[in-house]
Amino acid sequence: MMKEKTSKLKKSQKKKLGAIFLRGVVITFTVCVVLLGAAAGAYRFFIYDDGEAGSVFKYNPMAKKTRDINQTIAIFGVDKDGYRTDVIFVLNYNSKTNKAKVVSIPRDTKVTWSDMQKQKLQEYKGTNISISKLNEMTSYGGIENIRAFTIDEIERMLGIKVDHYAIVTIDAFRQIVDAVGGVEVDVPALDGKGLHYDDNAQNLHIHLNPGLQVLDGKQAEGLVRFRKGYAEGDVGRIKTQQIFLKAFAKKVLSPATLSKIPQIVPVIFTSVKTDLPLTEIPGYYGYLNKFDLTNLSFDIIPGEAEHQGSKWYFVANKSEMPAFINRIFFEEPSVSGDLAAVIEDKTVTIEILNGTTIKGAAGKAKDELEKLGYNVERIDNYEDNNMQSTIIYAKDISKAKQFQNYYNGAVIQQSSSITYDIQIILGSGID
């Protein structure tokens, strides 16, 4: 009788642990191919890599696991040869807002190598380069040096730190899609013909008719790799990838996926490489349990494709980047009564710059603020008159929030280099 009870208990425990484990696997893959998080119960099935060259940002293992976190993870899908990062995502999870935001970076993004990057490339590989596409950095510097080159460039481009990274192979992508029983996706029409492409050299054959259908691993690979015929070039391909990933997230987080544990585990065990320390992963349990799939969003960095010389590049828009990054990576949680907690200080010195094509906008803003008792010491035109969002720079960020009462939707950034206490750059969306 005792043995029978023990056996039942063990089966019950295994079932419960299996459910927890799969949730961890699901969310881990959400991170690795874009989806969500940090592998709750799957920590035994990761390959830990603790020493990439140039790794300078370290997580504090002594910190309390109940603390609020704002973690950023770079996710790379590598090509068949494992040299190029053909899929590049940066995922940010903010426990205060309980949101996971996925930012796509086009693989064709133009990179001007820094002196430090060129020095490291010379040291590691004995070669040199000045300009390339972002996905080519690992081809030149080696996938083993992804932190020193590609991640370093992402940090430089976005002005953020990448806490951890994960690398997933194309084979893993196919196998995991098959393991969950396929994914239902509405395949785009593209002139009514669907997606059709043959490349014998790569043994890549894509033939997908338009419309809602369940895709297996091979078909899903074709969907996310297809790039011919999009009016927006690689950006069009990224948008299709995001459609797939939303559908995938919905599928893998469904109760029916629980039965897929045995098929998913071996794939993750053999195909995912990450520098996330195994001992830290259990600390994410609490965050994953409260996550709502509706809080998963997707964006693409601002910019556009340009033909330069004999190549096409995606050129990031540097003027729009600060507002974009602030919205994605530094969003503050909505709290009732928050305005009452804002520090109002009318002694601050203010500079207003007109970043729009509206003549006299800075002068009008100056008059309005001075009527309220503020001191505007300088107005001028901003170097870029195509700003979309109003940006408020402040030496003391707590004193900048008061101006959000007057500029709805303005982005706040801290800066110690501005001349005045507050610098307001007006965007076309001023309200």
Image (cartoon, rainbow, N blue to C red):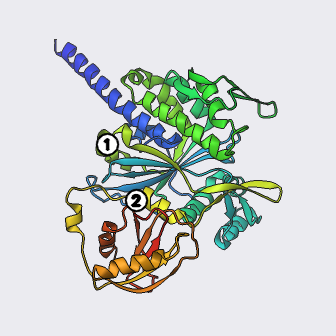
Residue 270 image point, x, y percent? 55, 35
Q: Is residue 5 above or below residue 342?
A: above
412 or 133: which is nearer to us? 412
Q: Secondary structure under badge 1?
A: helix
Residue positioned 26% across, 21% down in the render: 12
Which residue is disc 2 drawn over?
Answer: 59
Q: Looking at the image, is 256 positioned above or below residue 37?
A: above
- Checking the image for residue 297, the label placed there is none
Three-letter code for the amino acid on which mark 1 is drawn: Tyr
Q: Is residue 355 left or right of residue 254?
A: right
* Mark 1 burial class by Cα count in 10 Å: few <14, some 14-19, many 20+: some
Indicate the quadrant containing the C terminus: top left, top right, bottom left or bottom right. bottom left
Give 359 or 180, whichever is nearer the viewer: 359
Badge 2 element: loop
Q: Nearer the viewer, residue 280 or 308?
A: 308
- Any part of residue 160 in sight: no
Q: Is residue 193 visible?
A: yes
Instruction: Reply above or below: 112 against 138.
Output: below
The residue tagged 1 is 285
Disc tally is 2
Relative side of 149 to 260, left or right: right
- Where residue 10 sits, quadrant-wise, is top left
Seen at 16% across and 15% down, the residue is 2
Query: Label 2 neighbourhood size at 10 Å, few (<14), some (14-19), many (20+)?
Result: few
Q: Position of residue 316 (x, y in %)?
A: 62, 60
